[in-house]
Image: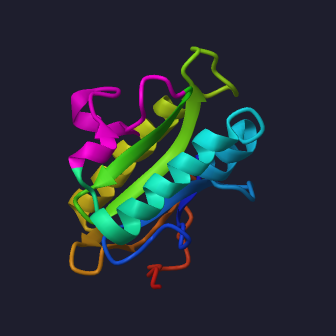
Amino acid sequence: MNYEIIELQQFSGKRAGIYSVMIADDNLTLFDHFVKAHVREHATEIRSITQYLSYIGNRYGMQNRFFKVKRGRPADGVCALFDHPEKKLRLYCYRVGTAALIIGGGTPRTGRRSGVVIPEKLLTWIARDISHKIRTGDIYWSEQEARLWGNLIYRSDGKQTSGRQEIQQ
């Protein structure tokens, strides 16, 4: 599977870079798909989630209070954006150090899963790949600049990407 890590500049700020993933041959990120699938039924919750993302990026950074950990396996780093028990949506995230947040898709709490791949599982796979790239130095994060740097494009077909991509504000 080929994908690219895309900065969501509308949420990113001086405290944290907020990113999502775009799967090859798609024109929407996983977060865009999440919003599109749930905005009609859960518009208020979508607004709340986007407000949290903006707070994380611009005001508070990656404080633990914004996240529910223990999603997936403990070592994979996947968590859910904190929400109240009465809320219906769950947005899955991968925290990269204290500088960046990669948001994937999500699901309604009803247990109903939309699409073929469960968003949490897809983000878990991507999180493991990103962790590997960080260990090998292909991707690194800057706490001072609150951004990811390096090769943010993954191609499983063995072809080289167009070099290192640096995302700047």
Confirm whether residue 155 shows in the render. Answer: no
- Report which quarter residue 41 is drawn in: top right
> Which residue does the image show at 73% across and 38% down from the upper left?
37
Q: How has the structure been colored for display?
A: rainbow
Q: Does residue 109 sit above or below 105 in this rendering?
A: above
> Measured from the top left, where is residue 70 in percent x and y?
27, 28
65 vs 113, nearest the viewer: 65
87 vs 21, nearest the viewer: 87
**Relative to residue 52, is residue 22 drawn left or right?**
right
Q: Is residue 81 magenta?
A: yes
Task: Pick out the residue farthest to the top.
Answer: 111
Confirm whether residue 65 shows in the render. Answer: yes
Magenta stretch: give its range. 64-87
Q: Does residue 67 sit above or below 86 in this rendering?
A: below
Task: Pick out the residue farthest to the right.
Answer: 40
> Measured from the top left, where is residue 39 in percent x and y?
72, 42
- Report which quarter residue 133 is drawn in: bottom left
> Which residue does the image show at 74% across and 55% down from the upper left?
25
> Which residue does the image show at 44% across and 81% down from the upper left?
166
Task: Pick out the residue farthest to the bottom.
Answer: 169
Q: Does residue 53 sit above or below 149 in this rendering?
A: above
115 vs 79, nearest the viewer: 79
**Relative to residue 127, is residue 20 drawn left or right?**
right
> Which residue does the image show at 29% across and 63% down from the upper left?
61
Q: Is residue 56 magenta?
A: no
> Measured from the top left, where is residue 16 in percent x and y?
34, 68
> Measured from the top left, where is residue 135 in percent x and y?
22, 58
**Relative to residue 80, is residue 20 drawn left or right?**
right
